[in-house]
Image: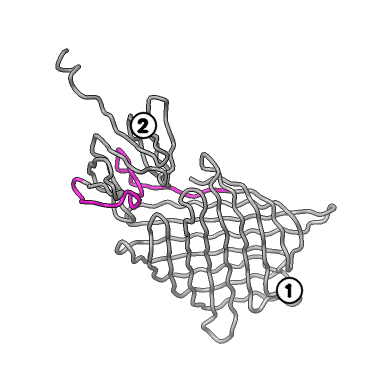
């Protein structure tokens, strides 16, 4: 009994930028949030607010976009570095995940609802729903998005459209990956019953740090357009896509951009592209406020329709 009482209890320690210090048990680090069990209860702490963390037991540590390794480490030094044993010294800010078990899947994404003001082929104020899901393993990444807009003005339907996309990335190295994707669009006010664009190619995860994430890809595919009032069309296309996330204040404010573009490579000059640009503000407990502008351009729209549609939205959502 005396020997058992003499055994030290687990006492991980976390220090924050404001000078606070807690002892207890590290539960996990995911999506920029550290979960820590202290005497006062479970704490959720922005990783950017942590200046030092010491863990008593070996845990799975993910540095950048590298596979997780089982290691242990003591408190950070004056330069903000911890020494992984094994693994060597790394800046605390480059650690992107901590877990007691090595989970094979990592999920992220979110959803939102907000006010929308549009101009172009649609001119209306409305509500819009959006959702995104990202599932990752060491070698595979699956991404799905969806946006739906539907409005009536004085009993008359003024907007009805939706878009969805799916993407699969197979990592060959930590940065190079093979990719396949599909984009679906429906918009009666642009005379589009269903536009399907899909392709395959290769991509690069150019940057994947705590502050900057940059991805680009390209390849060949096909576009099929089913219209409401004119004959349907299809053509072979080259495509490229990309995304950028820049953390202005980690965990509190970030800029984001994404785009998809398809260019006809058979006879003709049809092409279209769509972009999403905005800024996202972290509120509390995973909730975010987002200011966003979407642009959809079609080189050869249906007769009487404009080439460019713009959507400006202010939304409240949740990210995980």
Residue 62 spot, x, y in % from top left: 31, 49
Residue pictured at 68% horizontal, 68% vertical: 309
Q: What stretch is highlighted in magenta?
A: 85-111
Position of 83 compared to 259: left or right?
left
Please name whichever residue, 179 or 51, is drawn nearer the observer in this view of the structure. 51
Residue 187 spot, x, y in % from top left: 68, 63
Q: How is the image coloured?
A: one colour
Please name whichever residue, 316 or 155, is drawn nearer the observer in this view of the structure. 316
* Mark 2–mark 1 CB contact (< 8 Å): no
Q: Mark 2 points at which residue?
A: 22
Residue 87 spot, x, y in % from top left: 21, 50
Q: In which quarter of the image is the N terminus?
A: top left
What element does badge 2 sit on?
Answer: strand
Q: Residues within 10 Å of mark 1 (few under 14, many from 20)?
A: some
Q: Residue 305 carries which label?
A: 1
Please name whichever residue, 146 or 75, is drawn nearer the observer in this view of the structure. 75
- Is 32 a magenta residue? no
Residue pictured at 51% horizontal, 83% vertical: 265
Q: Residue 160 carries which label?
A: none
Position of 195 compared to 43: left or right?
right
Please name whichever residue, 12 or 317, is drawn nearer the observer in this view of the structure. 12
Q: Residues within 10 Å of mark 2 (few under 14, many from 20)?
A: some
Toward the left, the furthest residue is 3
- Is 86 a magenta residue? yes
Toward the top, the furthest residue is 1
User: In the image, is residue 13 above or below residue 288?
Assistant: above
Residue pictured at 22% horizontal, 47% vertical: 83
Distance in Å between CA atoms under marks 2 and 1:
61 Å
Q: Which corner quadrant of the image does residue 49 belong to?
A: top left
What element does badge 1 sit on?
Answer: loop
């Amino acid at each position: 009994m005396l020997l058992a009482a003499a055994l030290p209890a687990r006492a991980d320690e976390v220090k924050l930028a404001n000078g606070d210090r807690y002892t207890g048990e590290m539960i996990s680090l995911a999506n920029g949030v550290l979960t820590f069990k202290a005497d006062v209860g479970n704490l959720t702490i922005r990783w950017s607010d942590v200046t030092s963390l010491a863990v008593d037991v070996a845990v799975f540590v993910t540095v950048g976009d590298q596979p997780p390794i089982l290691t242990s480490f003591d408190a950070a030094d004056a330069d903000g570095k911890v020494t992984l044993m094994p693994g060597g010294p790394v800046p605390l800010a480059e650690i992107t995940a901590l877990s007691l078990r090595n989970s094979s899947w990592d999920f992220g994404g979110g959803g939102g609802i907000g006010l929308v003001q549009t101009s172009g082929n649609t001119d209306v104020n409305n509500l819009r729903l959006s959702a995104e899901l990202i599932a990752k393993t060491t070698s595979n990444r699956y991404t799905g998005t969806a946006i739906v807009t539907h409005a009536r003005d004085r009993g008359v339907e003024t907007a009805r459209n939706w878009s969805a996309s799916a993407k699969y990335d197979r990592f060959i190295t930590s940065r190079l990956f093979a990719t396949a994707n599909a984009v679906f669009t429906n918009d009666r006010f642009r005379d589009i019953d269903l536009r399907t664009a899909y392709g395959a190619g290769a991509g690069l995860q150019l940057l994947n740090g705590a502050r900057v994430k940059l991805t680009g890809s390209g390849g060949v595919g096909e576009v099929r357009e089913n219209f409401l009032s004119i004959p349907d069309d299809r053509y072979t296309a080259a495509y490229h896509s990309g995304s950028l996330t820049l953390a202005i204040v980690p965990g509190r404010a970030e800029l984001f951009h994404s785009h998809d573009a398809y260019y006809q490579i058979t006879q003709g000059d049809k092409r279209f592209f769509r972009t999403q640009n905005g800024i996202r503000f972290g509120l509390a407990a995973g909730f975010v406020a987002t200011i966003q502008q979407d642009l959809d351009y079609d080189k050869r729209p249906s007769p009487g329709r404009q080439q460019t549609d713009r959507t400006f939205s202010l939304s409240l959502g949740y990210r995980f």
